[in-house]
Every structure is written in structure tokens, then in C-alpha cells.
Image: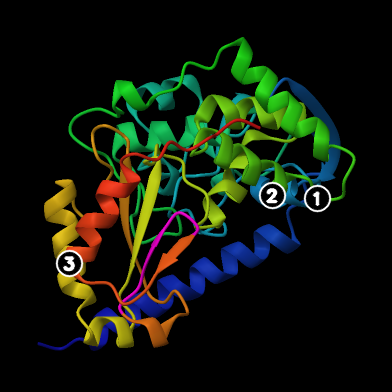
């Protein structure tokens, strides 16, 4: 089969595409365009020169909006609700939208070219992620890996906190201790993670409002550090070192023994919320291999028998999570 005609046709189409894009940038002018942005109970308004995509405009004007793919139209995180303006939806953005979203005017900011005045509303990041999961419109190879269990998002009812008045006072007291310090977010999240043993969504939302930050910014920091968890963890977190020294001295057998004793697999939490089991690459005590860590306590020269005795000991220990 002769592929030469096909190659020639593709080259011609490529040249035409480049010429049209160049002509659009150099010959077409859209003039000043007013952008009105509503985000988490705040409104922002500014004027820009038309001709670029909305995502770039928002970023340049310090509007917090997530884009995991960097504007390539392949992740769906930069969703905005177009209230007026914006033009027709593009095929590259349509694949990330459900029928309801299309009808309501939801769009990808990276796929909107600013050609006139625009009025948009940016949903908070957690809402965007939940919608992406619901529509199954995500790429698991991107930075945020979204895992859905069963047919609906659900969590063990025993593990969900009821964010009442006492919890709000607890969070407020922690925030007040760091509010005047530079960069208070990380230390605040550290204290909250210790107080609740994870970072519940209501706590993140309350913290974001108290610190006058977008929820998406708080959520981004909370997912950046492995020390933080967005799902409930056990009272005692057991980490089994599977580094070279520990593995060669039987750490694999210790992990199997723990899974059998606790009735869970690595990465899971017991039903009574007493223990969570993790594996780590190195604890830094190779001379004491094999090593495990329970909370902040490190135990070396472990054996499957010693592990069982340790579990029985920690079942009697209560962790104080008060401030």
C-alpha cells in the first residue's frame, strides 16, 4: 500500500492548521474583555486583552484554579460554570462533561478562548473531584489518583465524624495559635491531623474559611504530604519496614503475620478503628533489622512472635487526641 498520498494530505492539513492559528493570533484582535469571577463566596473582576485561553488569564490574575494537566485538556480539573459568554463547547472539553453539566454551562477553563466579556463561577476543588468520579471522567495516570469503591462514594459510617460545636471550637483553638505566624497552613494541618487522626472534609472546609483561603489550596497541601491522611486511620498506625536489610531478615514474614493477626491487608484499617497497617521503604534503623514502627515508637529485632505480643500490648493503650 502506498502511504505517500496520506502523508502529503496530513502535511497539508498541518500547514493549514498552523496558518489559521497564526492568522488568528496576529490578524484577529478582540480588544479589552471584562472577566467576572465568582469563587467561594467572593467576587473578582478584571479586564484583559482578548485572544488567549481563560485558564492562562485566571492564573495570571492570581485566581486559584486547579489544572493537573497544565492546560492540555486531558484532566478535567479546571472546570468552571460559564454564566455568560464563552462560546460553544469544544470536543476536547465535551468528553469531561456529563449531559447535566453541558446543559448547565460547565466548561473547561483551558478550552475557552477569551473573545469577549465573560462571567464565570468556579466550584471548589472537592466538588469538582466528586463530579469527575461520579461521571468516571478522569485519567488515573495523572497526579491525583481517584479511587472509587463500588457504585457510589461511601465511607464507613463509624469513621465519619459529626462536626459539631465542640469540634469547631477545637479547630478554632488550633488555628488561633498559628494565625499570626508566616505560613500557618502546614502546622495547623499537622495539629488537626493529630487531633482527629485524619483530615475530615468538614474540618478542611472550616479551616479554609478561617484562614481565608480557597478549599482547593488547603486540599492541595493536604494531599501533597504523605504524613496527612484524608481517610480515617486507626488509633495505632503500624509501619513495617521493607527496606533491603529488613526484608532480608524476615520483614515479609512479619508483614504477613500482622495481616493475619489484624485481619486486614496493607493500607487498610481494622473495623474497630484500632490499627492501620502500612509498609515503608526505610525507617533508618538497619542495624536493628527487622524493624516496625507503631505511631512514633520504633521496635527492632522483631519476630512474628514479638509482633503478636506487641499488638496485644497496644490494644490496652488509649491515645489521647485532645489539644
Front tag of 1 and 3: 3
Quadrant for residue 301, please give it.
Answer: bottom left
Q: Quadrant of the N terminus?
A: bottom left
| Label 1 element class | loop
- Please identify the residue farthest to the top as the structure is shown: 165
Between residues 57 and 265, which one lies in front from this camera angle?
265
Between residues 52 and 276, which one lies in front from this camera angle?
276
Q: From mark 1 to mark 3, how far is it between C-alphas?
A: 44 Å
Q: Residue 186 shows which numbered tag?
A: 2
The residue drawn where x is 39% and y is 46% is: 236
Q: Where is residue 48 in the image (x, y as percent from the top left)?
A: 83, 44
Contact, CB < 8 Å: mark 1 with mark 2?
yes
The residue drawn where x is 74% and y is 35% is: 213
Between residues 92 and 164, which one lies in front from this camera angle?
164
Q: From mark 2 to mark 3, how far is it between C-alphas?
A: 37 Å
Question: Is there any visible trace of residue 121 in the rendered image?
Answer: yes
In the image, residue 273 lies in the stretch drawn in magenta: no
Question: Is there any visible trace of residue 123 in the rendered image?
Answer: no
Judging by the rendered image, the residue that carries numbered circle 3 is 304
The residue drawn where x is 74% and y is 42% is: 63
Task: Bin the neighbour count of mark 1 within 10 Å (Cα to Cα): few under 14, some 14-19, many 20 and up.
Answer: few
Q: Where is residue 70 in the image (x, y as percent from the top left)?
A: 57, 59
Q: From mark 1 to mark 2, how far is it between C-alphas?
A: 7 Å
Q: Residue 183 shows which numbered tag?
A: 1
Q: Position of residue 43 (x, y in %)?
A: 79, 24
Task: Bin the neighbour count of mark 3 within 10 Å (Cα to Cα): few under 14, some 14-19, many 20 and up.
Answer: some
Q: In this view, does 225 lie to the left or right of 237?
A: right
Contact, CB < 8 Å: mark 2 with mark 3?
no
Front tag of 2 and 3: 3
State which region is magenta.
Answer: 290-296
| Label 2 element class | helix
Amino acid at each position: 500500500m502506498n502511504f505517500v498520498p496520506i502523508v502529503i494530505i496530513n502535511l497539508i492539513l498541518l500547514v493549514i492548521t498552523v496558518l489559521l492559528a497564526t492568522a488568528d493570533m496576529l490578524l484577529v484582535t478582540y480588544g479589552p474583555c471584562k472577566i467576572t469571577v465568582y469563587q467561594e463566596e467572593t467576587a473578582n473582576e478584571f479586564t484583559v486583552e482578548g485572544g488567549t485561553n481563560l485558564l492562562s488569564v485566571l492564573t495570571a490574575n492570581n485566581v486559584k484554579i486547579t489544572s493537573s494537566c497544565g492546560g492540555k485538556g486531558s484532566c478535567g480539573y479546571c472546570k468552571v460554570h460559564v454564566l455568560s459568554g464563552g462560546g460553544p463547547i469544544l470536543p476536547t472539553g465535551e468528553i469531561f462533561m456529563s449531559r447535566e453539566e453541558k446543559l448547565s454551562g460547565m466548561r473547561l477553563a483551558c478550552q475557552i478562548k477569551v473573545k469577549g466579556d465573560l462571567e464565570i463561577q468556579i466550584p471548589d476543588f472537592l466538588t469538582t473531584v466528586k463530579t469527575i468520579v461520579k461521571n468516571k471522567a478522569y485519567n488515573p495516570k495523572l497526579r491525583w489518583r481517584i479511587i472509587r469503591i463500588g457504585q457510589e462514594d461511601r465511607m464507613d459510617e463509624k469513621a465519619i465524624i459529626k462536626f459539631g460545636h465542640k469540634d469547631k471550637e477545637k479547630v478554632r483553638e488550633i488555628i488561633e495559635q498559628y494565625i499570626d505566624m508566616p505560613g500557618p497552613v502546614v502546622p495547623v494541618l499537622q495539629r488537626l491531623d493529630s487531633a482527629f487522626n485524619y483530615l475530615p472534609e468538614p474540618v478542611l472546609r472550616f479551616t479554609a474559611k478561617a484562614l481565608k483561603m480557597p478549599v482547593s489550596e488547603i486540599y492541595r497541601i493536604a494531599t501533597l504530604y504523605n504524613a496527612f491522611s484524608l481517610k480515617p486511620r486507626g488509633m495505632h498506625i503500624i509501619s513495617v519496614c521493607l527496606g533491603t536489610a529488613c526484608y532480608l531478615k524476615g520483614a515479609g514474614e512479619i508483614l504477613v503475620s500482622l495481616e493475619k493477626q489484624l485481619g486486614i491487608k496493607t493500607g487498610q484499617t481494622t473495623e474497630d478503628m484500632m490499627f492501620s497497617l502500612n509498609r515503608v521503604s526505610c525507617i533508618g534503623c538497619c542495624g536493628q533489622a527487622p524493624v516496625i514502627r507503631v505511631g512514633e515508637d520504633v521496635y527492632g529485632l522483631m519476630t512474628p512472635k514479638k509482633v503478636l505480643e506487641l499488638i496485644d500490648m497496644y490494644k490496652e493503650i488509649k491515645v489521647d487526641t485532645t489539644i
